[in-house]
Each structure stands twice: as structure tokens, then as C-alpha cells.
Image: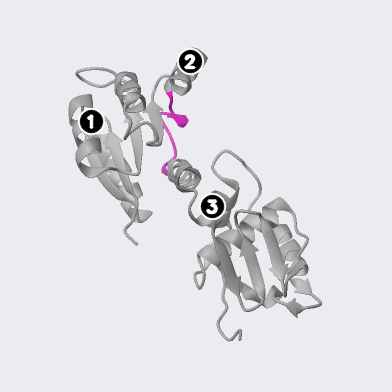
Amino acid sequence: MNEPTVLVVDDETAIRDMLRMALEIADLRCIEADNIHDAFTRVVDERPDIVLLDWMLPGGSGLELLRRLKRGDTTRDLPVIMLTAKTAEDNVIQGLDVGADDYITKPFAPRELIARVRALLRRSSGGQANERMQVSQLVLEGESRRVLIGEEPVEMGPTEFKLLQFFMTHPERAYTRGQLLDQVWGANVYVEERTIDVHIRRLRKALQAPRGDYSNLIQTVRGTGYRFSSRGVA
């Protein structure tokens, strides 16, 4: 699968360079524009998956471009994060009212921005969230939000469900606690990384069912975090 494409619209070269580096490290493709005319052209020509849009731009404001995107039949659903130095509450409300999906102010931490980008990409795609996934007799039904083992329902909390869903869509790869927080909790929820351990224990307990014990699918990776692996499962 090709990596998601992020269009960065900012007239400051240093900001674009920093964002491009952070996005590429996060395995996201970055394209750039420094004004609203070029930005709209890149949206039409390259169909990015998400836009990081500065408020103040030469030739017109980012808000003007946002309005144009939200009016278009083929662009109204394009996710947009406003990226700006404007911090007044009225500015935040104005951007969200026009159609921005999120709003982050400068200066910002690249890690937080990447987490918000990923969270918004997950919400906007909705694809994997509705998938039915199966490992032996363990079944996760994304649309109905049910987990079954041997056709018997498994009781688990919403956070444990989201953890299992993320693991099953990203198998055989080790994730740190911080990465799991970003992927499952999102950027706007701040909890201790050790909270992950509590939910992992709950998830493992839920997967210990009479029809099959699948708790060992959630593996502890010493010095890193956790991994979902079905190798060796019949």
C-alpha cells in the first residue's frame, strides 16, 4: 500500500522543511505549496489524503482556501488541519466552523502533529475500522464492534477493543507504549504510558476464553513494548 500523502501549505520554508522531515520519518509522503493558488492546484492534480494548512498565506488566507475546498464536490471531504500562530478562541472557532477538522498552533511538537495527522487519517478513511478480521477462531467484527472466539462473544471494554483492532490490522510489528498511545488514544488524550500495561493485561484476560486462549497473541517485546503475532497459531 502506498503511504498517505500530506500536502503542507505554508509560506515559511523552515516550517515546510521541518514538517517534511517529520512526515517522512513517520512514513508519510509530503508535498508542498507556499500559496493558496499552488495549493489548490496540487489538491486537484495529486489528490492528497490530508492538508496541513497555514492561516496566513500570500495571495489570500488559508481560510479562503479552506472555504473553496469545502465548496467543491470532490474536495469537501478532504481532511484539513489548520496550522497557525493565531491562538485567539474566536480564530479557532472560525476555522472549525468553516470546516477544519483540527487546529494546532505554532510552535508545536512534531510528535503531537504527527499523532493528530494519523488520528485524522484513521477517522477519515474508516476502511479498516469496519473490517472483519480473523486469526484461527478469534474473530473481530469492526462494523458491529464484536469479538468472538469460536462463535462465542468475548466481553471487553472499548479501549481493549480498539487495542485489539489496531494490533490485528498491524501484525508482526513491535510498537512502543508511546506509539500505541498515539494510535489508539489519539493526540488529544494525555495519559501515562504505563496505562498501556493495564489495558494490555485486561485484553489478555479477555482473550482467555473457554473456547480458546488467545492471550499469547499479545507479546511483550523486552525493551520496546508490545507486538501482535499469530505465527504458530493453527
Question: Disc 3 and disc 2: Cα gap in Å?
Answer: 29 Å
At label 3, counting other C-alpha atoms closer than 10 Å, the crowd grade (few under 14, some 14-19, many 20 or more) is some
Q: Position of residue 122 (x, y in %)?
A: 48, 48
Number of residue marks: 3
The part of the chain drawn in magenta is 99-110
Q: Reply yes or no: does residue 105 show up in magenta.
A: yes
Can you name the residue that lies furthest to the right here?
210
Give the side of residue 77 with respect to residue 153, left or right. Answer: left
| Quarter of the figure with the C terminus | bottom right
The residue at which mark 2 appears reads as 88
Please tell me whether mark 3 sits on a helix, a strand or a loop: helix
Visible in this render: residue 74?
Answer: yes
The residue at which mark 3 appears reads as 183
Please tell me whether mark 1 sits on a helix, a strand or a loop: helix
Return the disc, 3 or 2, that comes first in the chain's sequence: 2
Give the side of residue 199 with respect to residue 177, left or right. Answer: right
The residue at which mark 1 appears reads as 40
